[in-house]
Image: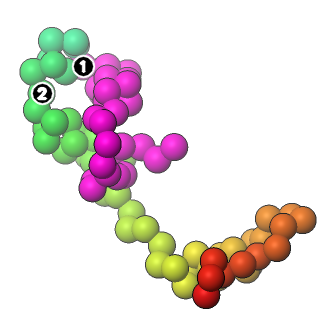
Amino acid sequence: MTPFAARPFATGPFPWSEAIGFGLGVLRLAPDAFWRMTPRELAHAIRAVRGPAAAPLARDELDALMARFPDSGMEVTTHGR
């Protein structure tokens, strides 16, 4: 699973388990300090520790990697291209 900090435009419910685990476990925040943070402050703290999110691969880059490192016993496709 991709860390939520690496999904800046992710949709769906907020990943509370990941956020709490990162805030309390990695950042070692006291619970009251964690709950006083805004989501934006938490996102900045995560980026400070993990670095900026990498841009996703373009389709042709993914196809090149799939051709170079095929899954054993599986046919490599270009997904309709």
User: Which residue, as the protein is rendered here, is positioned at the far front?
Assistant: 80
Q: Position of residue 24 (x, y in %)?
A: 31, 19
First reached walking from the N terminus: tag 2 or tag 1: 1
Q: Which residue is mark 2?
A: 37
Task: Please report the bounds of the magenta region as a residue range.
Answer: 1-29
Q: Is residue 16 visible?
A: yes
Of residues 78 and 60, the one nearer the viewer is: 78
Q: Is residue 66 left or right of residue 16?
A: right
Q: Which residue is mark 1?
A: 29
Q: Is residue 27 magenta?
A: yes
**Mark 2 vs 1: CB contact within 8 A:** yes
Q: Is residue 13 left or right of residue 68?
A: left
Number of other residues with Cα within 10 Å of mark 2, as a class: few under 14, some 14 to 19, many 20 or more = few
Q: Position of residue 55 (x, y in %)?
A: 38, 68
- Which residue is at a point 82% across and 73% down the rendered structure image? 75
Question: Which quarter of the rendered picture does the C terminus lie within?
Answer: bottom right
How many badges with numbers are in the image?
Answer: 2
Please determine whether, in this image, residue 35 is positioned above or below residue 55.
Answer: above
Q: Quadrant of residue 27?
A: top left
Q: Report the amino acid beneath label 2.
A: Met
Please determine whether, in this image, residue 67 is positioned above or below residue 13.
Answer: below
- Please, what secondary structure does the residue beneath circle 1 have? loop
C-alpha span from label 2 to label 1: 10 Å
Q: Report the amino acid beneath label 1.
A: Leu
